[in-house]
Image (cartoon, rainbow, N blue to C red):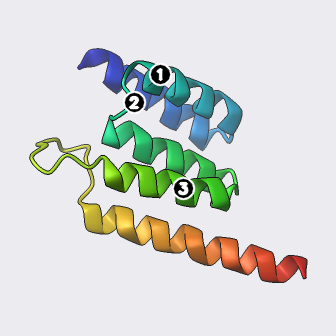
Amino acid sequence: DEARLVTLADVRINGYLSDHDAALALVDEYLAKHPKDGLMLEERADTLARAGNFADALIGYDVALANVAPQEDSPLREPPHVLIQKRRMAAAALKESASIRR
């Protein structure tokens, strides 16, 4: 729907401008009304990862994976294997950041 696409565009624009707080606020506002939207859940996790918040991104990817619609036909939806790879990268980044802090 149009509101979803507009929100997605706004979230991505703010993310690319490194305004992660604004991007998260937009995606959270959308998810308050559509809590099981897999694409927007993934976008939230992506935003957290770009902000360097890998622990929350990892949780976000798990939530997104749990909400992947198996029949959804959308050119904006990434295949689950891409989502799984993003989760692996967030886990690796979290592990690396933890080892740097020691």
Which residue is identified by label 1?
32
Label 1 SS: helix
Looking at the picture, which amino acid does disc 1 mark? Ala
> Is there any visible trace of residue 60 in the rendered image?
yes
User: Sequence-wise, which precedes: disc 1 or disc 3?
Assistant: 1
Looking at the picture, which amino acid does disc 2 mark? Pro
> At 27% across and 54% down in the image, what residue appears?
78
Tags 2 and 3 touching, CB below 8 Å: no
* Up-down relation of residue 23 to residue 96 (above or below): above
Depth check: give the residue in front, 52 or 37. 37
Which residue is identified by label 3?
59
| Crowd band around label 2 with a 10 angstrom C-alpha radius: few (<14), some (14–19), many (20+) | few
Which residue is identified by label 2?
35
Total count of labels: 3
Label 2 SS: loop
Looking at the picture, which amino acid does disc 3 mark? Ile
